[in-house]
Image (cartoon, rainbow, N blue to C red):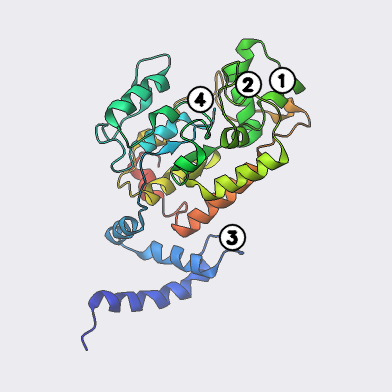
Amino acid sequence: MAIEPRALWACCLFPLALAGAAAECSLPEAAHQGSCILQTVARVMTPHAQQVQALTQARVVNFPIEWMHVPKCGSSFVNSIVQIPGACTGIPPDYTYEDINSSSPLTQFQEVARQQCKDGIDADRVMHPGVEDIPGWEEGKGRFMIMLRRPEQRLLSFYYFFLQELNYTLSSDTLSKYGGCVVKTLVRKFPHPDGLSCAGDPVSDEEIAEAKERLRTGFAFIGIAEQWDLSICLFNKIFGIRRCHAAQFENTRPTNGRNSTEYDVSELGDWHDDDNEIYDLAKRLFEDKLLEYNVNNLSCQSCWQEAGLV
């Protein structure tokens, strides 16, 4: 019986991967050994083999994409969403919504999305509506995508970007009213009378539990803002985006008057945001996807080089 050359090559490679997995694996010790083997195999795969693997792993996208845009969690995520094959055929590869010469580029992008993305992206979700408002949880389940940020950092960013100009202070009333933003967006209806996203009564334990269940079961992608570069590398791998574009990695809305997006959380005293349980779950789900798609700092080097990051 003739042996297929590619099969012979694989048979030779696999024992080598097994032998080197323990020594080369950069994953936590608790990680499954199989994940370490996959990571080791990826290191010796040729670029062409890696591209073939990426295409075969690419997830089938159900349109329209429902972007759950949490305030101050990365508006520039839209620069990646439009790169999904078939999502926005009329938008050029290096498009960035910040190219729009407007004081409200996201509002203008909504019109671009309606014209160029058609049914690829739900343009009505570009701003910050609740999931139950647009399109409804059951209607959009499985098509949602989200970037999440450490809750206290997000709250402070929201405060300095929006609330301070409206003469709010970081009082207990303000924190109570605007905390739990992710939970509220996942389970409640908006908008609120003051027109600002996430305003409302504190969330309940039941709402937190429901929000966690929705995060587990209804999202095609979950990214972590503090690991933006790795999140975008994973995003491209999951959805079969062949090129990594510089616009995907740009911080298009940096913190006002600061060189860093890190805030001093001591300003909040002993207050903790009710979104922390959601964020912790999101990180676990994100890490599971990194293992599933064999995405790590080493495997992302070619992507980051292509985008000009390294």
Q: Earlier in the sequence, mark 2 or mark 4?
A: 2
Q: Amino acid at mark 1?
A: Leu
Task: Indicate which label's residue lies in the foreground, 4 or 1.
Answer: 1
Question: Is disc 4 placed on a helix, strand or loop?
Answer: loop
Question: Which label is found at residue 28?
Answer: 3
Identify residue for label 1: 170
| Residue at image coords 34%, 36% | 82
Q: Amino acid at mark 3?
A: Pro
Question: Can residue 210 be seen from the camera position used here?
Answer: yes
Residue 234's spot in the image, x, y percent? 43, 49
Identify residue for label 2: 159
Q: Amino acid at mark 2?
A: Tyr
Question: Which label is found at residue 254?
Answer: 4
Nearer-the-camera pick, 80 or 182: 182
Question: Is disc 1 placed on a helix, strand or loop?
Answer: loop
Residue 188's spot in the image, x, y percent? 60, 32
Question: Is disc 2 placed on a helix, strand or loop?
Answer: helix
Task: Indicate which label's residue lies in the foreground, 3 or 1.
Answer: 1
Mark 2 touches mark 1? (CB < 8 Å): yes
Q: Earlier in the sequence, mark 2 or mark 3?
A: 3
Nearer-the-camera pick, 266 or 185: 185
| Residue at image coords 61%, 42% | 211
